[in-house]
Image (spheres, rainbow, N blue to C red):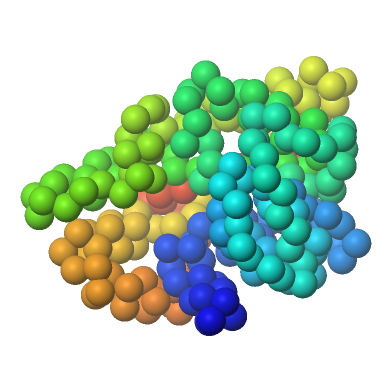
Amino acid sequence: MNGIRRALYRLSASTRVRNRDVAREINKLVDRNSSVLDAGCGEFGLAPFLPWSKVVGLDVAPSKEIGHNFEFVLGTILSLPFADRSFSVTASVDALEHLPEESRAAAIDELVRVASDGVVLAFPRGKDARTIDEEYGRALAKRARPKPEWLSEHLSTAYPEVPKIVEAIERAARLRSRAASVEVRYSEWDFGARWIRQSDARSPRFSLFLDLILGIVAPFMPRPAEDRSYRAILVARLH
C-alpha cells in the first residue's frame, strides 16, 4: 500500500508540480554523494523525486515514510538540529507561506547556515497565488464545505514575495561571511492550479482524476512565465 501511495504521489499534479521542478534544480547542484535536507517535508517530500540523493526530511509532524534514500527527523525549520554546513543542499517546498511573515527570515537563516553549496526554496508567490487560493476558498464556501487547514494557513498571512525572499537569502549569507548567487524560476501554470482547486470544490472525486491526468501531462509542458505561474523557485548558490 505504501508503494502505491508513493507512486500516486509522484504522478499526481498537485504533488508533482510542487516537487519535480525543485528536484531538477537540486540535481544541478548535487552528485550521488551529496546530502539534501528537505525542511517541511510532510509525509513524502522530495525524496521520491531525488532517488539518487540521500534525503533527510524534517517536519513538526511525524512521517511514517520509509525509503531507501529517506531519513526523517522531527524538528522545526526555525531551529534546525544540525551543525553548520551539514548538507550539500538545503531545500524547502511550500513551507514559508505557513510561517508568520516575521519568522521567515529566521527560517531562511537556518537553511543557509546548514548548507554548504546551495539553498532551493519554492513557495506560492505573492498576490497572484493568493488570488487563486482566495477563489478556491470562495468556491468551497459556496458549497458549504470547510477550508482545508493548509488553505486557512495560507490566507492567514501575507504570501511570500520574491524580492523579499531573495534579500533574506543574501542577508543570511553575508552574516556568515558568504555570498549567495540567486536565480529565480517559476512553476505550476496558473490555469492548472485553478482547475484542480475549482474541481475539488465541485467534486473531490473528479478532482482526483483531473489531478492524475494533469500530473501525467505536466512533464511535457514548458515552465510558465512569471505572470502565468502559481509558484516561484529560488535557487541560491553559496560561495
Residue 78 shows in the view: yes
Q: In the rendering, at what x and y percent does residue 92 appear?
A: 62, 45
Which residue lies at the image location 24% right of the left edge and 68% below the top edge? 204
Q: In the rendering, at what x and y percent does residue 26 appear?
A: 72, 55
Task: Pick the residue in front: 3 or 179.
Answer: 3
Q: How many marks?
A: 0
Question: Seen from this angle, which residue lies furthest right?
Answer: 33
Give the left or right position of residue 60, taking residue 172 as reference. left
Which residue lies at the image location 63% right of the left edge and 65% below the top edge? 65
> In the rendered image of this protein, does residue 115 appear above or below residue 72?
above
Residue 227 shows in the view: no
> In the rendered image of this protein, does residue 10 appear above or below residue 62?
below
> In the rendered image of this protein, does residue 167 appear above or below residue 111?
above
Task: Pick the residue in front: 29 or 75.
Answer: 75
Which residue lies at the image location 73% right of the left edge and 35% below the top edge? 80
Q: In the rendering, at what x and y percent does residue 55 appear?
A: 75, 58
Classify the position of the C terminus by image quarter: top right
Which residue lies at the image location 45% right of the left edge and 72% below the top edge? 12
